[in-house]
Image (cartoon, rainbow, N blue to C red):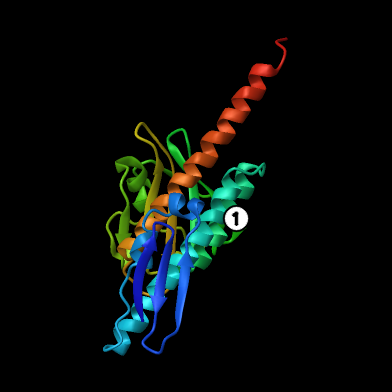
Amino acid sequence: MKSERIDPYRVKLSCVCGFSDFRAVPDKAKTVNPFYQKASLTPFVESEKGKMVLTMQRANREHLEIISLEEISMLVSSDFNLPEVLQHVTKKVAGQLKVSVCSIYLREGDDLVLAATHGFDPAFIGKIRLRIGEGITGTVAKEGSHISLTHASRDSRYKHFSELQEEKYNSMLSFPISDKKEVYGVINLNTTSIKSFQEDEIYFVSIIANLILTAIKLRQQVATGKKALQPSA
């Protein structure tokens, strides 16, 4: 199978047997997922069967990421309240990246509070708190850069929450939800299996973090606007 770019919007896939097909990527998907071209133009190698399968799987995963990002973008701009949006996001991200847990912590003053989760008991939403700089999550919030660990519990910064039964989980990716000025929260991924998060997965999560930031700011603006319209006492 050989790939050939026809124009900025289409790629032609052709086989030696004579079969050919075209793949189109919509404008919205290209905007949301800027690394889509890597998937579209990844070569298909026939002489090494294992390599061909791996390449096709990666291309398919990135195609699914485009769909997920479009769905999450629509959620962000919807009239759902923030807790509903965050809960939907954790579910979609966990399913997309096939991780056991996806959780979002939001900043409240000097604390980070569990605001949404897929995988942990939702009864602990609003109850799990840690300080900025505390644990791996708090460190990410303090330093403003992501941390990816194969064995999170072995890291000196790790903070254990027995109520979340975290002993079941091994690998962890923690990514800040931030702009250039401040941190608004952190998104975490946990797996029971031992894995190293790949570069494209980390990049995907970085886009999700930016979308969450947009959701937070949009709703803050709406709330500010409503307050401004309220008559003074």
| 193 displayed left or right of 216 | left
Crowd around label 1: few <14 · some 14–19 · many ≥20 (10 Å):
some
Most foreground residue, 188 or 75: 75
Most foreground residue, 231 or 135: 231
- Residue at the limit of the structure toward the top, as seen here: 233
Q: Can residue 2 be seen in this view?
A: yes
Q: Is residue 201 visible?
A: no
Q: Compared with residue 146, is residue 200 higher up or lower down, i.e. above or below?
A: below
Residue located at (38% from left, 72% from top): 58
Q: Where is residue 31 in the image (x, y as percent from the top left)?
A: 44, 49
Q: Can you say which quadrant of the picture contains the C terminus?
A: top right
Most foreground residue, 116 or 18: 18
Q: Compared with residue 80, is residue 221 higher up or lower down, i.e. above or below?
A: above
Residue located at (68% from left, 18% from top): 229
Q: Position of residue 184 (x, y in %)?
A: 44, 38
Q: Where is residue 131 in the image (x, y as percent from the top left)?
A: 41, 42
Residue underneath mark 1? 88
| 214 displayed left or right of 201 | right
Q: Given the image, on which type of amino acid does mark 1 rest? A: His
Residue located at (44% from left, 79% from top): 20
